[in-house]
Image: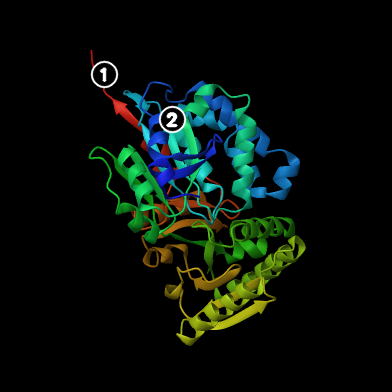
Amino acid sequence: MLDDDAAFGGPALEVRFPAAGVVPVEALLGELRPGGQLAVGDGRVRAFLSAFGKRLLRPALARRHPELGSLGFFLRPSELARTVEALGTEHIRVPRGLIFHVPPANVDTVFVYSWALSALMGNRNVVRLSPRAGAVAEVIVETLHESLAEADPVVAATQRIVSYDRSDAITAALSAACDLRVIWGGDRTVHAIRRHALAPHARDLVFPDRSSFAVVRAAAWLCAPRAARVTVAEGFVNDTYWFDQAACSSPRTVFWVGAAGDCDAARADFSDHVSRVVTVRGWGVDTAMAVEKRVSTYGLAADGLAESVEFRGNALANVTLAAAAAAPRQWLGAGTFAHARLGALAELAALVERRDQTMTHFGFGQDELEELARGLAGRGVDRMVPVGSALSFHRVWDGVDLPGEFTRLVTVIR
């Protein structure tokens, strides 16, 4: 990737989609100048996204990269239609304009969800794909190009995925030109990008550091049929191991709710099931990760936060917390889980922090979950979803209605 290159008379970047090679950033912005090419829910974009999603669901691809199957499911025509229909209002919705997306490098699919919803809302988009993006990102870009061959030319005219090494000049130019800047990737990224000024009318939509946890009713686990426990264990492994437990919605602590004896028995059985799933699927960690996990877990013990540490090979580590209030928010290494007991679900209210995003759950009723959500009153937890759904993206994310953020409302009164 290029930065300030005299051959272009200024900062340049690589356009990955549609493939165009290296171009000056000013030329790219000129290509994406304002116009009336797209409307909210534009049928041409819907057709393109549907075709792209269908390709992601090809069995061979979905088996190789399961997270792409989830993405393809999110882009199915019925879901796109529901997203557009949910925007019903007395006002006229119009695209917000030019959207600049800065996704994280460690979760390859996030940029597609963000970009797809913005494109569906009729926006022109520039997505900065990190040069450090992994193999899944490469597959996504290749599949986008496959889908472009049969798409309306308006898609290629209004959408860009670019790569460039860290460059203040390029980031500043894109920030100054956009109408909305979407920043994923944590506190440090948010602070770094916010140094670059936006136009007075523009705004930021940020997704800073978040942490997540699971909560399981011990009695419900012990009473569940074996097949149900296997399914939940498989879902828990999907929630945590797909992105090395680094996704903001992947649980790091498991809270067990109930009597002490039930919690001990349920936790032991749960760990056995998770260990079997990890073994069957061949999940493992390299030497460096194994060392990282041991340093992190023994560090908790040295600080008096952990009563015990158990390793099941290099892939699974369990930490028994000295107190539920000691639940760690930091990443401890892939496949590392802290465990704590609660007497009742309501005890979570005193433990939740604003950075807590997703609560995956098993064994609780709808009324109980809604009561907890109201009791938290916005202090934390933006999502409560069943175990196995932590990574399932929804158009409402981190408590933000993304399609709504990607549009503007026009009041028309006769």
Q: Nearer the viewer, mark 1 or mark 2?
A: 2
Task: Check disc 1 and give the amino acid type.
Answer: Val
Secondary structure state at the residue bearing disc 2: loop
Mark 1–mark 2 Cα distance, whole angstroms, equals: 19 Å
Does residue 341 appear to the left or right of 56 in the view shown?
A: left
Q: How crowded is mark 1: few (under 14 residues within 10 Å), some or many (20 or more)?
A: few
Q: Is residue 32 visible?
A: no
Q: Please report the residue visible at 64 percent of the width from the left and 37 percent of the height from the top.
A: 143
Q: Please report the residue visible at 41 percent of the width from the left and 58 percent of the height from the top.
A: 186
Q: Which residue does the numbered mark 1 point to in the structure image?
A: 412
**Image coordinates for residue 322, horizontal then vertical, percent:** 48, 81
Does residue 10 appear to the left or right of 270 in the view shown?
A: left
Q: Quadrant of residue 222?
A: bottom right
**From the viewer's perspective, is residue 373 above or below residue 337?**
above
- Mark number, residue 121: 2
Q: Please report the residue visible at 53 percent of the width from the left and 22 percent of the height from the top.
A: 153
**Image coordinates for residue 329, horizontal then vertical, percent:** 45, 68
